[in-house]
Amino acid sequence: MAHIDSTIERRRPGYARRVERIEGDEFEGLERVVRWLDDLIRIPILNIRIGLDPILGMIPWIGDTATAVFSLYLIGSAFYYRVPKVVILRMAMNVAVDYLLGLIPFVGDATDFFVKSNRWNINLLRKHARTQGRPGIGDYLFVCGVIGALVLLIVGGIALVFYSLKAAERLLQY
């Protein structure tokens, strides 16, 4: 697929730089992270691929939080590749839905087999990556705001878990 993209891009002036950046080692590193999180192991009978996301998701709340942090790296990379802000917001929503579903016991474990937010996000990144000039201060503020909101969501999830555990502990003491 990269060969087809590079052939198309070379015909259009001004896009040769895009091809170099997308086919570089950094993009392959992102693909490797996504493969580890979403597609590492193939389950033969079901013909489903799973990664560390559903495996770590078995650890209540901690596993989903850890994989959400790795997803933030992918969103930060979208800024590096100058993905439009609307697409970055969509990527953040994919991570937020995956994270919030993952916090629900049993439901989150089941959905981790089908909700592949990192795979969806790398496909969005691959589709929308381009070089359109230098990002402005508004771009930096927007991406920082989106990542900040996701960090607050993750911190809120952690606080909710600790509050729930404290409440359960108090109930068990009576």
Image: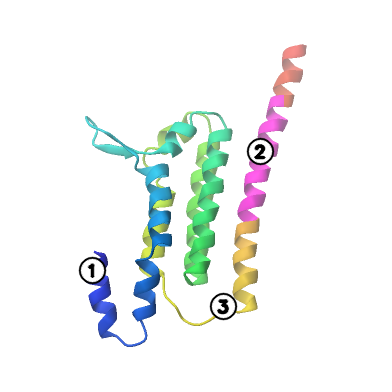
Position of the C terminus by quadrant: top right
The overriding secondary structure of the stretch rendered in magenta is: helix
Q: Amino acid at mark 1?
A: His
Number of residues whose C-alpha sits closer than 10 Å to that of mark 3, classed few (under 14), some (14–19) or many (20 or more):
few
Q: Residues under labels 2 and 3: Cα distance?
A: 33 Å
Residue picked out by circle 3: 135
Q: Is residue 166 left or right of residue 65?
A: right
Label 1 packing within 10 angstroms: few (<14), some (14-19), many (20+):
few
116 or 24: which is nearer to us?
Answer: 24
- The stretch in magenta equals 149-165
Residue with the mark numbered 2: 158
Q: Distance between the Cα atoms at labels 1 and 2? A: 43 Å
Magenta residue check for 25: no
Whether residue 172 is situated above or below residue 64 in the rendered picture: above
Against 141, residue 121 (above or below) is: above
Residue drawn at x 61%, y 69% as measured from the top left: 142
Q: Which residue is mark 1?
A: 3
- Element carrying mark 1: helix
Q: Nearer the viewer, mark 2 or mark 3?
A: 3
- Alpha carbon distance from label 3 to label 1: 28 Å
Instruction: Look at the numbered disc 3 and give the secondary structure of its residue.
Output: loop
- For residue 1, side relative to residue 67 (left or right): left
- On the image, which quarter does residue 131 sit in? bottom left
**Are the two marked residues, 1 and 2, in contact with CB atoms closer than 8 angstroms?**
no
Query: Which SS class for mark 2?
Result: helix
Residue 169 % position (x, y): 73, 19
Could you say where residue 73 lies in the image, as x and y percent from the top left? 53, 55
Q: Earlier in the sequence, mark 2 or mark 3?
A: 3
